[in-house]
Amino acid sequence: MTEIRVPKMGPTTVEVEVMELLVSEGQRIAAGDPVAEVETEKTEVTIEATAAGIVSEILVSVGDICEIGEVLCTVETAG
Amino acid sequence: MSRRGANGAIGLEPELAISLYRTMRLVRRFEETCVDLVKDNEIAAVVHESIGQEAVAAGVTAALGARDYLTSTHRGHGHILGRGADPTRVMAELMGRTTGTNRGRGGSMHVGAPDLGILGANGIVGAGTPIAVGATWAARTDGGDSVCAAFFGDGAINQGVVHEAMNLAVIWDVPVIFCCENNLYAVTTSLSDMTGVPIIERAGGVGMPVTSVDGMDPGAVHDAMVEATARGRRDGTPSFIEFRTYRYSGHHTAEAATGVDYRSDAEMESWRRRDPLVTWPERLAAGGILAAGGKEAIDAEVEALIAESVRFARNSPWPEPAEVLDLAYAGGAGDGFPATTWGGT
Amino acid sequence: MARLRYLEALRKALRDEMIRDDSVIVLGEDVEAGARGMTTGLRKEFGAERVKDTPISEAGFVGFATGAALVGKRPVVEFQINTMIFQSFDQVVNQAAKFHLMSGGEFRVPVTYVFAASGAAFGNAAQHSDHPYPYLLHAGVKTVMPATADDAYGLMLSAIRDDDPVALFSPALIQGRRAEVPDEPTAVPLGVGRVRRPGGDVTVVAAGPTIPIALRVADKMAAEGIELEVWDPRSLLPLDRDGIARSVTKTGRLAVIDDANRTCGFAAEVAAFAASELFGHLRAPVQRVTRADVPISFSLPLEAAALPTAETLEKAIRATLAGSAS
């Protein structure tokens, strides 16, 4: 299982707001697929999947403020 | 040195050549008077005399137009008076009176006058140079052709901010004339001990025309400024001019009392022989520009003006202590400023 | 009304003022590209004469702004990193801030200094993590630190319109947060504080990045029946001392949480004010929660240990509740 996290955005960006979730639980995704649209204090960013597999759990909701490094969702990579 | 016209060794218009003498005489006598007033403590603290350097102030300011700017230094009486500040009000400022150019708030090192384009004298070495660049840039964005004379001394050539300011002038085409009054000493330290290369080599790397002229010759100073200001007005080019000069006095009025000894008698004497207050009127007389009695008439007029300045300053009121906060902020210092309760409650 | 992020609100205020007043210009490092987010798009809209990238010459461009202000511009200077104030300190405190007085009132210096992403932001280490506003307060420079987007908008307008230098700190920890911002320009005057959460038991003075901390602690303690009044000065100089007095008169207890160093800091000023002028209303000693007076270490546990936190604030509040002046 792999966790997809909010990646580092910049030296002083400390959190992002989840604007849109682009995957749902049970969905099969490839590495590089868009997972979520988030906004930093400055701009909109698309977070991409860092692994291929099936989305097993989504841990955030639209409107959540997530810190850098926070887990957005988990992906079952085996099978 | 190029010389125009037919007046002997002097290439300047006679009226201008004579006015240069008058400015130099005014500055010399003003400062000699200041020295006495400092000794008597009628002027608080000390002043930094420019005695010996008057040709630079006179020549530079005579080349400026009505819409031009000037930033001055701690040694700035010559710049201020040359630019046309009223000596009576400058003297009142030095005595801390409400009638001073800055209501007594600035003193010798901080004279400023918007109507004359004097954007402050400055007590911090080199600190006026970026202010000069910003003001001149701003004035020209409105379509004007202003230039600015930014004065500083040889000591300022080792200040980072001067190089920052020169670079800004180059990259943004701002015609500031960087006027370096090289009197060879920063307080007591000699330029050659403190600087690895000649001043104009240092400045030359910034990307503007540089030149070095005889700062004991007001005509040469004026010529160099005319060339630099014309170039600046035309295409926004900044310039750097080193004026080689010398102060006959100490770093300030109390220097003698500190017992420092850093200049040889021979050196002092060699520069004294080139005193522009002596050599310039001699040249004017030899060229037939200054008639017999002409110098004496100017001297007498200056003397009367100095006497009037001292009288005016002495008779002017001191600020009231209750005014201490009045000018801290443009909008005034109201209840929200801790300073309003500085003495406790 | 629109829900804007703090940084968007600053940008909107700057843009609105640039539209309203031709004399407003903006300069700083990488402002054309909008590296800090506040100036994005302004170069294209307003042109090279009004939006200027500067070299990395903080003393030079701060002095430049002073000069431009002396002859009629209203420059907004963006410091890309707030500790760069130190390189330009002479030009800010010894030139711009003193020019009006030194000139006998002849000159005005209407400059706004914006400190983007100010304060600590997790791992930026010693030279990029200070929150240097107390230096400016000490020097008498008008200083504001909005905590929310609406105040960011309103205080930015006031800062630009003010005829003196004004420093605006935009803390990294909160400049992504949203709030409702009026569509019509509405200035927040300098020197007027704001009750962020009313309460009757303890006054908590917080500012900028410590506002969310104070609100979090207030939520937690409310569950125990302890009501904190979170009071936000918004403007650190001028300071709404009457507002502090009103709150402390009501609660009788004061804790100050401040994201700057302790010695001669903002919290020290508020505490001294309360001790000297509100002594009769205080039922316990004033508590100060500040940074430790130490450079910020890179390593995150050490950074956190030097900063004011919800835990240290809660402890201070419990101390003031337990303490008694009589």
Image: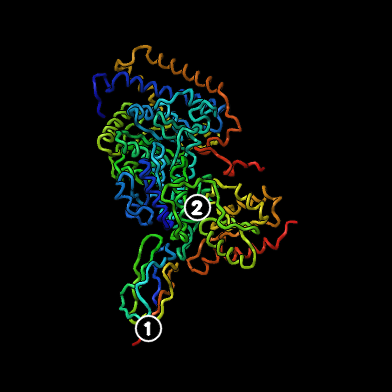
Residue A4 — which label? none
Q: Is residue B294 above or below residue C323?
A: above
The quadrant holding residue B157 is top left
Percent coordinates x, y for residue C206 in the rendering: 56, 56
Residue A76 — which label? 1
Q: Secondary structure at mark 2?
A: loop
Q: Amino acid at mark 1?
A: Glu
Which of these two is toward me, B243 or C8? C8
Residue C145 — which label? 2
Which of label 2 and label 1 is nearer to you?
A: 1
Which residue appears at 38% of the width and 40% of the height? Answer: C73
Which of these two is toward me, C194 or B197? C194
Which of these two is toward me, B57 or C178? C178
Which residue appears at 30% of the width and 34% of the height? Answer: B144
**Residue lying at the far front of the rendered structure:** C1
Percent coordinates x, y for residue B316 in the rendering: 55, 23
Q: Amino acid at mark 2?
A: Met
